[in-house]
Amino acid sequence: MRSGILINIFITLILLFLPYDIFSQVMNGWQASKETVERLQKNQIEFNYYEEKVPSYILPDLLVTEKGKKIRSTGMWEKIRRNEILELFRKNVYGRVPSTPFSESFRLIKEDRNAMGGDATLKQVDITINSDGRTLDIHLTIFIPNKAVKPVPAFLLIDNRGPENTDPLRLVKSEFWPAEEIIARGYAIAVFSNADIDPDNFDDFKNGIHGLLDRGERKPDSWGTIAAWAWGASRCLDYFETDKEIDAENVAVVGHSRGGKTALWAAAEDQRFAMAVANESGCGGASLARRKYGETVSRITKAFPHWFCSNYKKWGNNEDSMPVDMHMLIALIAPRAVYVTSASEDLWADPRGSYLSLYHSLPVFRLYQPVTRLTEQMPPLNIPSISGKLAYHVRDGVHNLLLKDWNWFLDFGDTVLK
Ligand code: GTR
């Protein structure tokens, strides 16, 4: 009893002597700093950065079917509601993969059993997609830890930054893809360039995989570039399933920013992925569209018309009528693992809106694991919040993917992939 009182006094004293900023975060969770809000708001007056100006909104219900039936079990979720929501995302956001037949083959281009000073095996694999006699190659680079005694879980990065971050010779190293550190933690680490599947520019869907697989006129729900990149991640997973050194049932798909949007959609479409990591994925990724905070649907569809299906444009300035919001995208990944992140200076990607998506996906995750809990309040800066298969952090600093982020992904991976 006495020691309880002493502990309380001790905690109160610590809180009293903390700098105000940290004190407020411990009590209220992370909030954007006033200075950052004002700076960004001044530079981009047409977008909102003030939390007080976020409109009130009602999110579509995850657990009521289109016919008004209440979902009460994982069976009903999987049989009815999950399929409805998946279809809504195909139709209204990312678009539909065409049913054009194709074949694929894998070719080991290079193998080095003595990479990273003997710590890892390097494999460079070309995945060739063939349709009607024309082909497209995805170049997959993989390091596998040599110490492993059984197939290892893997992280697959969708690289949207260019090859200077993913040097297979390891002469150039980058925190964006910290291969050595990931190998040391006992995971395989793989990467492919999104440009192999579809170059990141608007060319009316003539090049990349669109050029290979699209037939006839484009429709309002034809797949966009994000759906194409997500499809490419699944082709890499097809290869993992053939490699005895990789545990293909425990692969995390990871992406930063536009890559983060892609990672979420890849794991929603392909239930073989055990985990999705959406690093600072923002609008069209984890952040709730209805909040209209930072980047908006209307802005993203103007700036990047090739990323989504053309139906998505309809929801710009009309978010409240959109039949989905991004908590439903996260729910599609249940009961598999999801890690969402933000950065404290990256308000364009709406940290609070990204966290709230995770929070509002809880009803579905709790159908599987009733003990999963998150508070509506965000965790403090640089303190990951993990419950069951859900994880989130807000890292200090600007829009980027850093070793600090990866270390937290690996910690979470240790609880869900091993
Ligand atoms: C920005 C875009 C974001 C985000 C980012 C990126 O210009 O507005 O949605 O995707 O690019 O991918 O780096």
Image: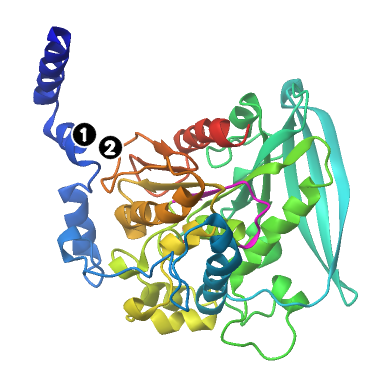
Residue 395 % position (x, y): 36, 40
Residue 12's quadrant in the figure?
top left
Residue 247 % position (x, y): 74, 38
Give yes or no for contact between labels 1 and 2 (Cβ–Cβ under 8 Å): yes
**Callout 2 secondary element:** loop
Q: Which mark is residue 380?
A: 2
**Up/down of 267 relative to 68, above or below:** above
Residue type, numbered disc 1: Val
Q: Does label 1 or label 2 sit earlier along the sequence?
A: 1
Q: Quadrant of the C terminus?
A: top right
Q: Was residue 38 drawn as part of the magenta stretch in this picture?
A: no
Q: Which mark is residue 26?
A: 1
Question: Residue drawn 56% across and 86% down?
Answer: 220
Residue 185's quadrant in the figure?
top right
Name, please, the residue furthest toward the top: 2
The scheme the figure's colours follow is rainbow
Using a 10 Å C-alpha cutoff, classify the residue at mark 2 as few (fewer than 14 neighbours), some (14 to 19) or many (20 or more): many
Question: Residue drawn 36% across and 80% down?
Answer: 321
Residue type, numbered disc 2: Pro
Magenta segment boundaries in residue numbering: 269-279
Using a 10 Å C-alpha cutoff, classify the residue at mark 1 as few (fewer than 14 neighbours), some (14 to 19) or many (20 or more): some
**Can residue 199 be seen in this snapshot?**
no
Q: Quadrant of the N terminus?
A: top left
Question: Residue drawn 80% across and 35% down?
Answer: 245
Front-most of residues 235 and 402: 235
